[in-house]
Image (cartoon, coloured by chain):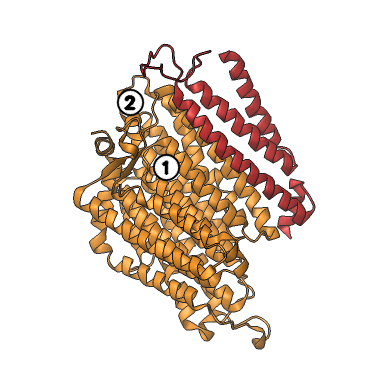
């Protein structure tokens, strides 16, 4: 399971960097989304994987450390996902607005515009 | 409780501002009052720290490594007060400077979001909480930067947004890795565990990721390209706000992390920090010397000056860090003041281009002096604060025997003087280009004008009072360097 997750995380990082290197700004936004997902998965792994063990205490409030997952990374991911959602929404609006203003989504044309 | 108010106050002001969304006068009043209270509060926190030493507070009374800790030592209290003063003056400045559409589109709400995030970053003692405050600050700055949505603003913002987002994600990755390795996110607890650890070198990968992430925020050498692309594009009131606060938060966090967490391989980090400081200084100032737009010149100078602060950190002595902290305060004030004065020149003449400006000294001598004083302060002329900041750093450098970086710092400050004189010559002294009658003489908005005067007076007073204040800055440097003090403050 850990190996599978490691491969997925690595693949997501690679995909996001590939997307960053493309010319289209829309793909840039996709790259940002991949990058934040890769990081969220990485955070998830850092707590240690315990399959089938939820991060809850027993009904009487006692905790057996051997049978529960670490709740902190899950809380971190929740926060990070919410922040990521807001940022993705903002960057989509930014790209859309940019397209409306300039009529292009090509980063090379963006650089040419800079000269003038 | 008192340490949480600098964060709660701006956030509650946002609620009030949203309720008065359509009534601009009321919004202005709320903003100025809340910034004023924030300044008083920051002064009170600084007084508490000076009297009783550093202190910490735990959110929800959870004991230290488990809950979220807020810590105030002299360094963070000084930064808090400087930011609050600066935001108060820039808020007053922008009530007259900004156009109606931008003010109505939520400008006041966004600056409060920005200040809340900045204050949180200065005070928090928890790494993940720091990430959250960074995001609060960044999202407000994204919207501030695109406010108005002009073509060139959008173009600059894309670079700003993407590079800063990548920086945030790298920061988050480093947080994940460090939690996986140590099992804690409280900065004091982490510092303790690192000092007890046997495999301390394992931390280096996370430290490098932190360094890259904060290097992007602070606009250090290989990562600064977003800054010249984006800072010159929004109106100058917004740039003044961002220039005074955002990059300095990056520097603050680099200094804090370096002093707490760099325990092994100190030499490697020393050469890394010093090398980056030198290249940052030189590249920033050379780009400034080759530009002909006031806002671009001033933006490039931000980069160059960040190099000085990082140099003070690299020295890692009380003199170096005290100098760096003094330099940060001076830079936040002087940089903002040059932007404010540059904005007034724009209002007066209708352009930022040095070729088209001219003869401001003849037509409006006071405006010329309002620009000259902070510009000379940036270049380092006594008795203005920039001189003392550079003096402390250069003195610290020579006593440490860091000859190369100190020589670079002196050379860079000469080029800084050159590019400031260039603005002075072109905009203020030379005869107007073309026809005499073509020069505009627009009236200046009074609130912006008086806010700039207040800022410049503040800089002069700060420079003159250096003799009394310098001990406190060196004490702040000593407190930052002393990781044990920080740990004992948080974990009783």
Quarter of the view holding residue B198 = top left
Q: Is residue B207 above or below residue B286?
A: above
Residue B457 percent location from the top left of the image? 37, 72
Quarter of the view holding residue B186 = top left
Q: Looking at the figure, which quarter contains the C terminus of chain B? A: top left
Q: What's the colour of chain A in the image?
A: red
Residue A112 percent location from the top left of the image? 75, 53
Q: Residue under circle 1?
A: B254
Q: What's the colour of chain B in the image?
A: orange
Q: Earlier in the sequence, mark 2 or mark 1?
A: 2
Q: Residue under circle 2?
A: B193
Cα–Cα span, label 2 and label 1: 20 Å
Secondary structure under the numbered disc 1 in the rendered image? helix
Pointer 2 local density, CA inside 10 Å: few below 14, some 14–19, many at least 20 = some
The residue at the point 62 percent across, 54 percent down is B229
Q: Is residue B41 above or below residue B403?
A: below
């Amino acid at each position: 399971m850990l190996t599978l997750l490691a491969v997925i995380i690595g693949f997501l990082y690679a995909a996001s960097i590939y997307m960053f290197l493309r010319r289209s700004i829309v793909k840039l936004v996709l790259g940002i989304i991949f990058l934040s997902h890769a990081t969220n998965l990485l955070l998830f792994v850092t707590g240690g994987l315990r399959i089938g063990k939820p991060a809850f205490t027993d009904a009487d409030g006692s905790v057996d450390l051997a049978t529960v997952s670490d709740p902190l990374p899950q809380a971190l991911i929740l926060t990070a996902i919410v922040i990521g959602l807001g940022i993705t929404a903002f960057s989509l609006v930014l790209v859309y607005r940019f397209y409306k203003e300039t009529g292009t989504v090509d980063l090379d044309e963006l650089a040419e515009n800079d000269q003038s | 409780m008192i340490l949480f108010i600098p964060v709660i106050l701006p956030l509650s002001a946002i609620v009030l501002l949203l309720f008065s969304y359509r009534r601009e006068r009321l919004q202005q009043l709320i903003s100025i009052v809340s910034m004023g209270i924030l300044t008083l509060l920051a002064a009170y926190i600084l007084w508490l720290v000076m009297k009783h030493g550093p202190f910490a507070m735990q959110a929800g009374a959870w004991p230290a490594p488990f809950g979220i800790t807020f810590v105030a030592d002299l360094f963070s209290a000084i930064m808090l007060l400087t930011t609050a003063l600066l935001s108060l003056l820039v808020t007053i400045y922008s009530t007259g400077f900004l156009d109606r559409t931008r003010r109505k589109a939520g400008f006041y709400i966004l600056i409060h979001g920005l200040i809340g995030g900045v204050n949180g970053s200065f005070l928090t003692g928890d790494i993940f909480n720091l990430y959250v405050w960074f995001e609060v600050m960044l999202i407000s700055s994204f919207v501030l930067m695109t406010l108005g949505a002009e073509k060139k603003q959008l173009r600059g913002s894309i670079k700003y947004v993407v590079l800063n987002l990548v920086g945030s994600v790298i920061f988050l990755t480093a947080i994940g890795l460090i939690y996986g390795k140590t099992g804690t996110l409280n900065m004091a607890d982490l510092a303790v565990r690192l000092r007890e650890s046997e495999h301390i070198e394992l931390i280096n990968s996370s430290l490098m990721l932190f360094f890259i992430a904060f290097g992007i925020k602070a606009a250090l050498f290989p990562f600064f390209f977003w800054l010249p692309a984006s800072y010159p594009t929004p109106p100058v009131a917004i740039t003044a706000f961002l220039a005074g606060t955002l990059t300095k938060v990056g520097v603050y966090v680099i200094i804090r992390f370096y002093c707490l967490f760099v325990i092994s391989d100190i030499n490697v980090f020393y050469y890394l920090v010093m090398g980056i400081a030198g290249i940052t200084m030189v590249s920033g100032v050379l780009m400034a010397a080759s530009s002909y737009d006031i806002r671009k010149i001033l933006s490039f100078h931000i980069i160059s000056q960040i190099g000085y602060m990082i140099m003070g950190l690299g020295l890692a002595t009380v003199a170096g860090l005290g100098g760096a902290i003094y330099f940060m305060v001076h830079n936040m004030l002087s940089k903002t003041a040059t932007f404010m004065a540059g904005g007034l020149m724009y209002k007066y003449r209708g352009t930022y281009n040095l070729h088209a400006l001219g003869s401001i000294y003849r037509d409006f001598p006071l405006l010329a002096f309002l620009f000259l004083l902070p510009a000379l302060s940036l270049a380092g002329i006594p008795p203005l604060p920039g001189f003392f900041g550079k003096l402390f750093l250069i003195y610290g450098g020579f006593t440490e025997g860091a000859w190369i970086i100190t020589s670079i710092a002196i050379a860079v400050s000469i080029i800084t003087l050159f590019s400031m004189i260039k603005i002075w010559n072109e905009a203020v002294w030379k005869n107007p280009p073309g026809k005499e009658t073509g020069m505009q003489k627009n009236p200046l908005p009074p609130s912006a004008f008086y806010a700039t005067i207040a800022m410049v007076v503040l800089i002069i007073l700060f420079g003159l009072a250096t003799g009394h204040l310098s001990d406190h800055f060196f004490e702040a440097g000593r407190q930052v360097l002393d990781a044990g003090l920080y740990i004992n403050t948080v974990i009783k």
